[in-house]
Image (cartoon, rainbow, N blue to C red):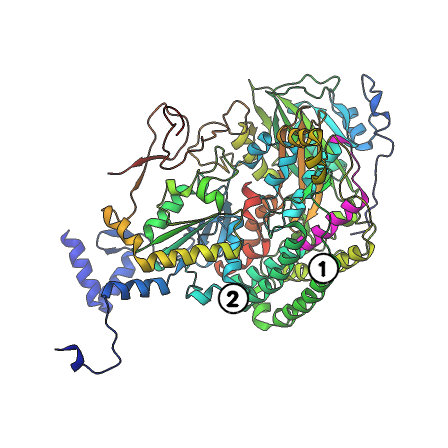
Amino acid sequence: MAEPTAVVDEGASEEFHERPDKPVPTDEVAAALVAKFEGSIFHDSHGQPVVYADRSQMADIATYLRDEEQFTTCLDVTAVDHLTDAERMAVPGVAPERFELVANFISHARNRRIRVIAQVPVSDTTVPSLTPVYAGVNFAEREVFDLFGIVFVGHPDLTRILMPDDWSGYPLRKDDAPARVPVTFKEDPGPRVGGAA
Amino acid sequence: MALDAVPHNFLTGRLEDVVRWARRNSVFPATFGLACCAIEMMATGAAHYDLARYGMEVFRASPRQADLMIVAGRVSQKMAPVLRQVYDQMVEPKWVISMGVCASSGGMFNNYAIVQGVDQIVPVDVYVPGCPPGPETLMHGILTLHEQIRTGELLKRREVSPTGGAAIQVSEPPAGTPRMPVSISQAT
Amino acid sequence: MNEVVNETERLSRQTDEGAQELKASHELVVTGTVWPELEGDGETMIINMGPQHPSTHGVLRVMMELDGETVVRAKPVIGYLHTGMEKTGEQLTYVQGCTNVTRMDYASPIANEIVFSMAVEQLLDVEVPERSIWIRMMLAELSRMASHLLFQASNGMDIGAVSMMLYGWREREETLRVLEMITGLRMNHNFVRPGGVAADLPDGWQHAVLELCDKVEVGIGDYDTLLTGNPIWIERTVGVGVITTEQALALGVSGPILRSTGFAWDLRKAQPYLAYDKVDFDVIYTQNGDCFDRYRIRLTEIAESIKIVRQCVEMMPPGDYRVQDKKITPPPRERIDQSMEALIHHFKLFTEGFRVPAGETYVSVESPRGEVGCYIVSDGTGKPTRMHVRAPSFYNLQSMGPMMEDRLVADAVAVISSVDPILGEVDR
């Protein structure tokens, strides 16, 4: 493959402090996405282009990225549970929900990345699966299903992957207890009664 | 027959001691590498530390041919039944070394996924501390086990229990208990 | 019951007559068990390999559907080492976080520490000193050497070159000794931390590191002599487990597996981080995408790492090894003895940790297995809301199915070995 040329969004972070209500995409792919998919919002996160989109558009966005923008690989699909956030990063124009579905894409040919984030409410945790577009997210979507209970519609084999099949609950949800076991000591003499010896 | 009537070059002793000596000198470990500790277990068996010096370089792939299980690494809830099955397949007499803090007590991973100590599933003879224990530490643990085999302390414990040391029964938790898939009840 | 007895008797007589009859009926009855088909014409069977198996690198389990000796489908089953690290990561402060991530990819812990630290630093918006960047880079390459040496050892053993186990570990022990000298631990170093590294390089590190480079260079020459031209080795690996660039990219595969398909993608070159743009090294890639190529790439990458490490020794800048920012750096040990404030400061930092502004970021580096990424979401407190690691082995493992399909079951072990999965990272 040819020498990839590094494309860095210079100066993106400088403008960051005066954030307009509707941020202007500094990234060309993000600009194309915002123009094409209604309701999607651009956000600059530490110099990385992020597009907040509606969850129903996820598969269409992935198809567009793969077919039109040379995004060869979906690197990662994961989720975030914002239930217990002390302070949540506010993105203007995005109505926050409890879960966020995060997908990272990379274009090897153009040497650039983009992140697409969709809000998923707890009442309806279904999202279209990206597996028909990127076969490689198969395991990742199973993991998100296993740990967060987000259901990917159209996934060929949506079963638990990390936890045992008969497990109940979704461990990475914030309301699912970490199941800490109190540390016990064998032959624990128990608390001393009376005054110290 | 009087003792002075037999030819020379004889040693007398108890048969039990000879059996212990023989057992001590040919402990066959099963490969039960789980996580980081498995790499250090490999290191112990490899060129530099050379476990063969103690007559135990042969790591057996089949639990049927092994009599020592080195539980090297964290045991997850999903792995726990497998571990128990492997242990049950080993033939008596058998020993277990719990290598590393994760196997011994859950270590830093006190959460939903990890069994808090492999001694909840199988009886452990020697605990080796460290995260991961260096090869020297594991070798010290192995030599401690050798000494215990030689002095027969392990046999005493096994005599107490009719199940040959496997005195821990794994059963379903009663309804309503906080979710921990493996609950422990001591067999009589 | 009588029928069974008769059948058994007839079998034990083993007359031609009886055998012919049996073959015609396609039904063999031995003590009550019915074997429907003896001749495998299109009939497949499913066999299970692992999770406790000597050649599955830990606790990987592979379900294989076989037609005779040919693998029709293969599916990795994982989760036997699931440690809940991402949940634990939400309960640890950012200082403690490195202790957690370093135990994911235990063959190359430094890469995980670096990616976590870089993500936290990006959220904090701090610049780490030049010296710590170079220390990180040198350790990352030492760690890559150790990881690839481990691969050479285990790959050799899996395929049957058992002496490679000893040779590979010979050099790996030397590497671990130098890592121990610098970081204090053989594995799971917890040395790279947000804001720099835990300590400065010890006295005499140049000598130790350069001596190591010479030793390992001789070692990989030995492996080359032992394996590369070895007819048995070639027979076992060439043309085995082939994967194409298109498949690899679609499956999210990265690292040596992707490079073995003729796609020269290395984050160290493509999107340079640390100081990789200031050192001279080559991206190794081959064209065939088989097990032999993956072995060759990893062997040659050791040589490239040696090259980088030598440049690090030469160009190591002086200065601080961690950022002098009171917010995130603990006071030096000497000051704790003298000053109460320093003691309180130290205590606060290690119990409550430092606060990280709310935000999210994804940072990735090239680990020996491919792109390892760290996605951190902060809610402004001392502990992350979400700490997710994009583990390269997790995605690389998916390529195992396409590599094994339509190959003999005897090649399965070679394929598993050449994918080089680290199950701690897969299951996290």
The amino acid type, in three-letter code, at marker 2 is Gly
Quadrant where the N terminus of chain B is found in the figure: bottom left
Image spot of residue A63 (x, y percent) = 69, 34
Instruction: Answer yes or no: are tags 2 and 1 on the same subunit.
Output: yes
The quadrant holding residue C195 is top right
Q: Nearer the viewer, residue C22 or B22?
A: B22
Image spot of residue C276 (x, y percent) = 79, 49
Q: Is residue A125 left or right of residue A11?
A: left
Residue where numbered disc 1 is placed: C209
Q: Nearer the viewer, residue C351 or B97?
A: C351
Image spot of residue C294 (x, y percent) = 64, 58
Q: Chain of mark 2?
A: C
Magenta segment includes B171: no
Whether tag 2 and tag 1 are in contact, CB under 8 A, the answer is no
Give the vertical position of B102 relative to B48 (above or below): above
Quadrant where the C terminus of chain B is found in the figure: top left
Residue where numbered disc 2 is placed: C160
Q: Earlier in the sequence, mark 2 or mark 1?
A: 2
Q: CA distance from mark 2 to mark 1?
A: 32 Å
